[in-house]
Amino acid sequence: MSPPKTKKELRRILGFFNYFRDHLMNYAEIVRPLTDLTSKRYQSQIPWGEAQQEAFSKLKELLKRATQEPLYAVDFNKPFCLFVDASNFSTSAALIQIDDNGKNVPVAFSSTKLTESQKNWSVIEKEAFSVLVALRKYRHWIFGSPSATTVFCDHNSLNVLAETVPKSAKLVRWALALQQFNINFQYYPGHKNVVADCLSRLES
């Protein structure tokens, strides 16, 4: 995750970290150098100095630690939530569980670059591919889980993909591949899907 260059990029990244703020100790204090850049003082481009870089690096390290240390042990008796998204150049996913206090707990994150030919796919093909990539990547957690995994995405057509037989041969194969998983699709508007949206736009 590279440092943001514009206020729009910064807001997207802040939305990502804010989603998991309950697991980032001293979040408000650490993030202050970054939130200060969202004021009306700055237009599109934002200054980036040592304080901002230090805060940015600290947030990344804390979130990484949250998924590696025994902060939360995956509970296979609880359902998984899989947030996915696709941009013009990559797909992304965030695997999450909800703890006993109703908080979203990060389990794993991923971002996969699209090849040149994949970049030419239609929107529904990219979105469907993002689901397949995520399910295969986290198969060892999801497959065989007694509870259905809810897949959150911002494309209603994926419900059609799961419930009907598409005309595209490629989508037919993918629809069949989805049937091995116990999943439910739920439409999730892009402006709310802050985690997967941010990850799908990572170019580095």
Image (cartoon, grey):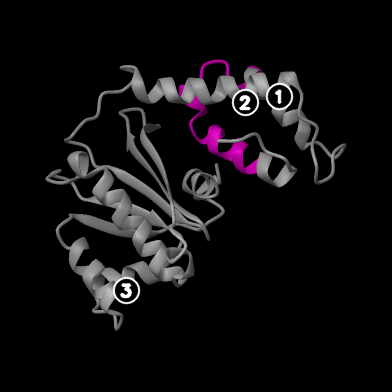
The structure residue drawn at horizontal position 71% and vertical position 30%, both measured from the top left corner, is 35
Where disc 2 sits, the SS reads helix
Q: Residues within 10 Å of mark 3 (few under 14, many from 20)?
A: few
Q: Residues within 10 Å of mark 2 (few under 14, many from 20)?
A: many
Residue bearing mark 3: 160
Q: Residue 41: image x %, image y %?
A: 87, 37
Disc 2 marks which amino acid? Phe
Q: Residue furthest right?
A: 41
204 in relation to 173, above or below? above
Q: Nearer the viewer, mark 2 or mark 3?
A: 2
32 in relation to 42, above or below? above
For the stretch drawn in magenta, the main secondary structure is helix
The structure residue drawn at horizontal position 35% and vertical position 21%, both measured from the top left corner, is 68
Disc 3 marks which amino acid? Val
Q: Quadrant of the C terminus?
A: top right
Where disc 3 sits, the SS reads helix
Q: Quadrant of the N terminus?
A: top right
Q: Nearer the viewer, residue 65 or 189?
A: 65
Q: Which residues are magenta?
A: 11-29
Please indicate whether residue 159 sits to the left or right of residue 154 in the image. left
- The image's mark for residue 14 is none
Dividing the picture into quadrants, the one containing residue 106 is: top left
Residue bearing mark 1: 52
Residue bearing mark 2: 56
